[in-house]
Amino acid sequence: MSDLRELYQDVILEHSKAPRNYRELATANHRAEGYNPLCGDHFTVYLDLDGDSIRDISFQGSGCAISKASASLMTQSVKGKTRAEAARLFDQFHKLVTGQSPANGNRAELGKLAVFSGVSEFPVRVKCATLAWHTLNASLERKQGTVSTE
Amino acid sequence: MNTVANQLPREFRPPRVQTVFDVGKVRRDFPILAQRVRGKKLVYLDNAATSQKPQVVIDAISRYYEEGNANIHRGVHYLSERATEEHEAARKTVQNFINAEYAHEIIFVRGATEGINLVAQTYGRANVKAGDEVLITAMEHHSNIVPWQILCEEKGARLRVAPINDRGELLLDEFERLLNPRTRIVGVTHVSNALGTINPISRIVEMAHRHNIPVLVDGAQAVPHAKVDVQALDVDFYVFSGHKVFAPTGIGVLYGKTALLEAMPPYQGGGDMISSVTFEKTSYNKLPYKFEAGTPNVAGAIGLGTAIEYLNGLGIDNVAAYEHEVLGYSTEAISKIPGIRLIGTASQKAGVLSFVLEGVHPHDIGTILDQEGIAIRTGHHCAQPIMQRFGIPATARASFGLYNTKEEADALVAGIQKVREVFA
């Protein structure tokens, strides 16, 4: 049960039930879709990019608690950040959930995203935690089509 | 069980009488079930994905490699002769198991998927033309959808799909209406892997045969749970996978009626499927070898034969009766959990309990149950059109086998209660 509590921390459960920035973004000038064919998780990330910085971001879609909470917390974390800052954050986040524990200083940089540290004990759930981030990445890189975890 | 009676030669044993199914004894036949996972007793409820193997099957495979391994059908030496005999004996065992008229109607393949592809690529390519139709149902596994799609695309034919109702039952009237002079073949599952629905195969075959349309039945989820008689059902093709019926992976069966198999072009070319080869002309071997190019999975076939003998020893009717009881018990217990919605509530079901839980994604259910040592499957179960039909992205699926118990159903219910606690 302790591993489970590590995975399903209160913040994650709360965000999965009441995701933030969960809407279509009228001002979006970028969007991308992410899809995990293994479990059917499907998200659309909307971006309002002002030059190099993320002026606004939102998402919609369906998925498990981990993927939905991750998308929700991601939108909060990257709003107002530059592309480079968002990319760096994803890198830190990826290291966190895959158990390549970032240095303590960097962990502080992750802020609330640190609640996903329990994912590293559940390797099959890494894709859930990173789906929204991969989708954001695609949107920033203006890739066309749907991003897939497979 | 009378142990003295069991030691008697087969022909002297008293006729089998209906006995109480001793699940505790059966469980001891499956060594993998005794282990603990994640510190908990393993509760294996993923039998629709693959079954576990009894010790006799594991031993038969080991013995083959320790004592009997050789290539078959062309050796003059002792081991080759013996391996050939065992391989062909397994074919006979399969023949009797599904009551095929002839042993040569049993084609060994890798599994149900390959069996369907074989029929689509041989019978299908020879008989389906532009404007023709292939009819399947809305509850098929991807393996009984995609091979027909590939065929239809190549030929400019049309794939038609008979609908199901909200309980997950085939709408027979709709099915019958879709049969027409352009229909070349029907593909239908015997038991749905995602819903557990048992289809009325006899009636389906009767309808199709009135239009002279052959029927292929995907029996992958049926043979572990019920006595299948291909002659009584009058099916034209029947496929199943060994690994779902306590045999190893990589071995499966295509049954076809002799006349159809004779008329079909070969599937793969190579050794064993020929009777003579020159660079100008090759003549093909007789059935079943025409469809078995290359060195086959001899150990797999022997494992399958042994698994069927094991099942026969338990008595498939006893197994079916016991499983029916456990599934009924589980269905009732799980239905009482608040927020549970069963997906697939057909009046005739076997083996499968698919469900969703309000406010919790199936993937999260799977992870939490796994921490309790309970193995279920979550996702679309290779049946995405069914998920679309029910308007859900995925389900959690507990699928039962002959070694599962009511206590395990209780553990599943307790596990789901834990899921509700985590997400409360």
Image (cartoon, rainbow, N blue to C red):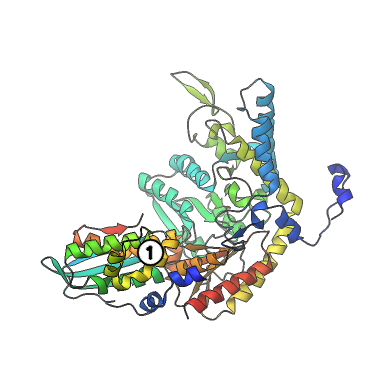
Please provide percent x and percent y for residue A131: 33, 63
Task: Please state, as top left, top right, bottom left or bottom right, where the N terminus of chain B lies in the image.
Answer: bottom right
Residue B418 occupies which quadrant of the picture?
bottom right
Above or below residue A16? Residue B169 is: above
Residue B52 vs B409, above or below: the answer is: above
Chain for mark 1? A
Identify the residue shown where x is 56% and y is 45%: B249
Residue at 60% in and 73% down: B413
Which amino acid type corresponds to the residue marked 1 in the rendered image?
Cys
Mark 1: secondary structure: helix
Residue B376 quadrant: bottom right
Please give the count of numbered marks on the rendered protein.
1
Q: Give x and y (percent) for residue A130.
A: 33, 63
Residue for badge 1: A128
Depth check: give the residue in front, B16 or A28. Answer: A28
Out of B308 and A116, give the one closest to the viewer.
A116
Q: In this view, does B251 lie to the left or right of B402?
A: left
Dot 1 alpha-carbon crowd within 10 angstroms: few under 14, some 14 to 19, many 20 or more: many
User: Which is more toward the observer, B275 or B396?
Assistant: B396
Q: Nearer the viewer, residue B102 or B206?
A: B102
Query: Taking B235 as reference, is B81 left or right?
Result: right
Residue A35 in view, yes or no: no
Rendered residue at 45%/39% (across/down) = B126
